[in-house]
Image (spheres, rainbow, N blue to C red):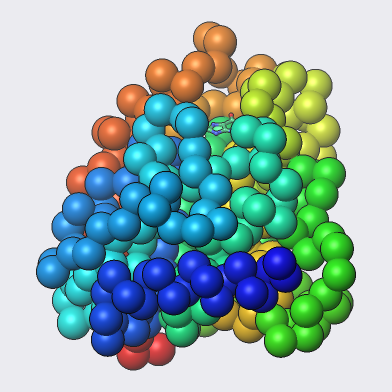
Amino acid sequence: MSLYDQMQETLGVVRARAPGFSPQVGIILGSGLGDFADTLEGRTVIPYAELPHFPHSSVPGHAGRLVLGTLGGASIVAMQGRVHAYEGYSNVQVAFPARVLCGLGIKTLVVTNAAGGIHPDCGPGDLMAITDHINLSGWNALTGPNDDRLGPRFPDMSHAYHPALTQLLGRVAQEQGVPLRRGVYVMSSGPSYETPAEIRMLRTLGADAVGMSTVPEVVAAAHMGVRVVGISCITNLAAGIGHHPLSHEEVAETAGRVRDVFIRLLAAFLPATTKA
Ligand code: HPA
């Protein structure tokens, strides 16, 4: 079955579960950042396991549910958890849920993740607007035959992170009193964290934060012509920058610590994107 036909099947199930609901904004909630979805009003919740072709995660902190609801007058579809290429999925499969969100007719996709801080100014607990990315995953979400119904064979990535919406995010953050940095996100394949030598290399390459996700979904959204805004939650200093070993526990703990600020920022920003 083609990717396009798989998407139609999944979209049919989502539409049947939330009849008449047409989301304006989609959001992918990264490691430990899923609680925002619980703040949506009039929620319809669909476990990924009930969605045909939807990959589901095995990582603690990734609940794996699609949540549809409203907030501040905006209709929103949220992914509470995502899968990663390191779980054994291809980047094509990793991007599939983002394609379903785009297929629901969203105008904006907000991607979030937990990331290690490489830039000296990026410390644990900081939020960073992603201005661009470097794909070092070794793979691309568009590998394989192109379906022209979804997008072009060679999509432009010059403005993959929508500049005006990213500026809007900065203004909203300022209004909310939320400090927000800007920087370049690099995707490494994981699941081992990077070595200190790799982090020095990534710094030289121009990366400010490193993680194991996001790039496949952004490539798919760019392919489908959907505007993207990216936010990294810096959960730890990247390898060799701090003085203690990296752990998933630290990542989860820091993500939990920024929970309220993160939710406040998203609650103000997501409705604002529908007017921009
Ligand atoms: N490296 C890669 N992925 C991550 C990190 C990191 O330091 N922190 C959170 N996700």
Q: As rendered, which of 74 and 148 lies closer to the eye?
A: 148
- Position of 124 with respect to 266 (left or right) is right
Q: As rendered, which of 110 and 90 lies closer to the eye?
A: 90
Q: Residue at x 44, y 58 (%)?
A: 51
Residue 102 visible somewhere in the drawing: no
Location of residue 1 with respect to 61 vertically, above or below: below
Q: As rendered, which of 129 and 274 lies closer to the eye?
A: 274
Q: Residue 119's image quarter?
A: top right
Figure quadrant of the C terminus: bottom left
Location of residue 101 with respect to 53 vertically, above or below: below
- Number of residue marks: 0
Q: Residue at x 73, y 82 (%)?
A: 151
Figure quadrant of the N terminus: bottom right
- Position of 97 with respect to 65 (left or right) is right
Q: Position of residue 252 (x, y in %)?
A: 38, 28
Q: Position of residue 148 (x, y in %)?
A: 78, 85
Location of residue 256 with respect to 49 vertically, above or below: above
Task: Point out the residue furthest to the left here.
Answer: 42
Q: Residue at x 63, y 33 (%)?
A: 87
Q: Residue 241's image quarter?
A: top right
Q: Residue at x 18, y 64 (%)?
A: 43
Q: Quadrant of ligand 1?
A: top right
Residue 68 visible somewhere in the drawing: yes
Q: Position of residue 70 (x, y in %)?
A: 20, 73
Task: Point out the residue furthest to the front here.
Answer: 1
Q: Position of residue 220 (x, y in %)?
A: 66, 68
Task: Point out the residue furthest to the bottom here.
Answer: 275
